[in-house]
Amino acid sequence: MKKRILLAPVILILLVQCTGLKEQKIIDAHRKSLEIALSFNTENYPWLMGTKYPQIAVWVTTGSGDHETVFVTQGAGRDKWMFADERPGALPVWSGIRPTKKGLEIDAVSGATPSGEVHTIRWEIPEKYEGKDLTVFIEANVSFDYNDYYSKAKSSPGYSDVNGQPSVVWRSAFRVDDNPVQMTPEIAGHGHVLGKNSAIDSDMTKITTAAELFNYINIAYHPGS
């Protein structure tokens, strides 16, 4: 009987580790904050072993060029990949503004790859952004989502091994003031399929299912009370 009692906590710990559960950050309701809800369109990223969810990065920029990462999945944030040392084509746009790997910034904003139907990211906005205009960027990419242009054929001009189609970037803008805002970001473009640069390419004519990784993206700015 004692063995059974002792076994239960161990199983619980293993379940938490295997599912990648992570405690949500506590947001002060009196402070200004941002809430981003991502609804996953899992039909667009099937995998041999079930469902392979996309790598995701969320960051904000100011008009003067300052930027801050809000959230990034651990694979891209820490460059930890299966069967590869690095994948520059995973989130190339975010990689252009990523915090230093040697600092604590990555650990503070990185989380396990989301799963399930909806994932919500919450961010308490630092006071330094008070009264400023912020642009929110969301970059997402899923492996093996090949199409006619970004195909499996090595002779294809869009060939990139495991990447398939490149990352897609959504964006929306708001002002950090006392007015609440609900936003639906629009697609700004895509990243370089091989990660050779961090530019956003606005030409989406060769992108198909990669533009439909989410059923919806809702962004809510809460001014606090």
Image (cartoon, grey):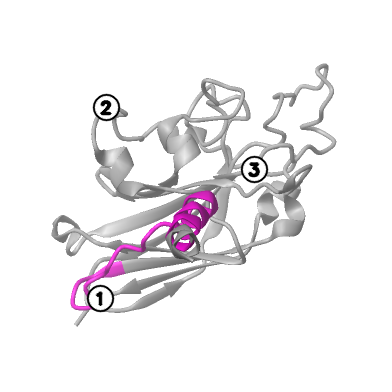
Residue situated in front as seen by the camera: 154 or 116: 116
- The residue pinned by badge 1 equals 223
The kind of residue tagged 2 is: Lys
Q: Which residues are magenta?
A: 8-33
| Magenta segment includes 10 | yes
Judged left or right of residue 39, residue 149 is right
Q: Is residue 151 left or right of residue 190?
A: right
Look at label 1 and name its amino acid. Pro
Q: Residue 113 in the image: x percent, y percent?
A: 52, 49
Q: Name the front one of labels 2 and 3.
A: 2
The earlier-in-sequence mark between 2 and 3 is 2
Which disc, if any, is residue 171?
none
Crowd band around label 3 with a 10 angstrom C-alpha radius: few (<14), some (14–19), many (20+): many
Q: Does label 1 or label 3 sit earlier along the sequence?
A: 3
* Residue 186 vertical position relative to residue 181 in the rendered view, above or below: above
- Distance between the Cα atoms at labels 2 and 3? 26 Å
Q: CA distance from mark 1 to mark 2?
A: 33 Å
The residue depicted at 58 percent of the width and 22 percent of the height is: 84
The residue singled out by tag 2 in the image is 102
Residue 22 inside the magenta-drawn segment: yes
Q: Which residue is mark 3?
A: 142
Picture coordinates of residue 47, whole percent (x, y): 75, 44
Between 45 and 220, which is closer to the camera in this rendering? 45
Disc 3 residue type? Val
Select label 1 or label 3 by which is in front. Answer: 3
Please give the name of the residue rendered at 25% of the width and 66% of the height, measured from the top-left corner: 176
Answer yes or no: do the residues labelled 2 and 3 have beta carbons within 8 Å?
no
| Residue 66 picture quarter | top left
Q: Secondary structure at mark 2?
A: loop
